[in-house]
Image (cartoon, rainbow, N blue to C red):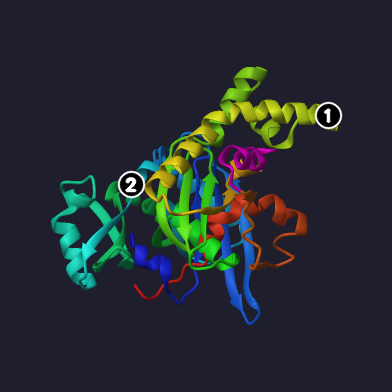
Amino acid sequence: MFDIKSLFSGVQQLAGLDIGSSCIKLAVVRDNPKGRVLTLFSSIPLAKGVIVDGAVVVPEALTATIKELYKNSGCKIKNIVTSISGHAVIVKKASFQQMDQEELRALIHDEAGKYLPFDDMSGVDYDFQIVGENPYNPSQMEVLIAAAKKEIIEGYTDAIRAAGLIPVIMDVDSFALETMYGENYEFEENDVVVLINIGASITNLNAVKGGMSIFTRDFTLGGNAITEALAANLGVSFEDAEKAKVEGTGDNEQAKAAYREGLLAYADPVCSEIERSIEYFRSTFGAENIGKVLLSGGGGLIPGMAADLGNRLGIETEIVNPFKKIQFDSKTLGPGDAVRIGPIAAVGVGLAMRKIGDQ
């Protein structure tokens, strides 16, 4: 079920189900002679407290919400690829002596404590992807390992099955972003881009070089923290603050600009943590020059966020466009919808491009 290799291969159709802590998104991407086309995108709010720190706390509520989403969308595809992130999943890059995949799997299982924070692998699902030869030691290979406790994965898969669907692949949010990026953007072998997804409660960072991940980090701080600070300052409900956060306030552009400047102050904790993550990446991969930051997630829609981050990081920063090359059916999205929905659809689009097949 939990299969890193599934992220890079396959042949059959799936629907992507992006389960966030505040919203669930459903996407379907189909192949046609002219390329890939988004044929369905639908979303629905998820009640607060159903997903906490990347774990399913109220499975019955998650199942009911998935059922409602499917009913509203009219989607008929039962096979699902979904994803986890945050503390729910451990992603680590490690070097190993050259060996075949079966030998590597056995080694990781038997010596898990050396590579993963688990002494007993019986309660853990894991997989790996051989990235390539170690650039400093040809006798070694670079391997990306992902692992999660079975109880975390089962929390999602059981809720999905209870909704009458079939969970086929468990992806990782950061890798779904990588898939979306690889499909939509042109890049050279040495180009380094950082993909940042600011969700409601978790922010994902994935530094990719030549389209392949070289560094990932998640932290449990996102758009909700900004909304809560704004609600406390304005003396309004969380729901009203959430609406104001994206839409802006004031009767004229000058008032709106002043509001947005104040809003970015509430986003400072999130931006500061992103800065620290980028600094850590730079110190670890000192020779890598980051060419661009692509921002996604609901937090990416906050007015001025991309420009502010770009100034703080000293790196060109822009809102991601998951429809740069992927077309969309006019019955699914209008041109204006694509711009508005793009940042929150990025993970779901990446999930929807996964296929059942080569494992």
Tell me where the magenta segment starts and ends, as one range: 303-315
Q: Residue furthest right?
A: 252
Question: Residue 186's spot in the image, x, y percent?
Answer: 59, 67
Horizontal side, residue 230 vs residue 124: left or right: right
Q: Residue furthest bottom?
A: 33
Residue 37, above or below 277 = below
Who comes first in sequence, dot 1 or dot 2?
2
Horizontal side, residue 37 vs residue 139: left or right: right
The residue depicted at 53 percent of the width and 47 percent of the height is 197
Q: Which mark is residue 152?
A: 2
Horizontal side, residue 296 vs residue 127: left or right: right
Residue 18, above or below 187 = above
User: What's the amino acid at mark 1?
Assistant: Gln
Q: Which residue is nearer to you in this view: 342 or 71? A: 342
Measured Cα–Cα span from mark 1 to mark 2: 47 Å
Q: Is residue 45 magenta?
A: no
User: What's the amino acid at mark 2?
Assistant: Ile
Question: Residue 10's spot in the image, x, y percent?
Answer: 43, 74
The residue depicted at 65 percent of the width and 54 percent of the height is 342
Label 1 sits on residue: 254
Q: Secondary structure at mark 2?
A: helix
Q: Which residue is nearer to you in this view: 108 or 121? A: 108
Nearer the observer, disc 1 or disc 2?
A: 1
Question: Residue 31's spot in the image, x, y percent?
Answer: 58, 76
Few, some or many residues within 10 Å of mark 1 (<14, 14–19, 20+):
few
Report if residue 91 is visible in the image: yes
Would you say the residues marked 1 and 2 are in contact, meaning their CB atoms lie under 8 Å apart? no
Q: Which mark is residue 231?
A: none
The residue depicted at 46 percent of the width and 53 percent of the height is 207
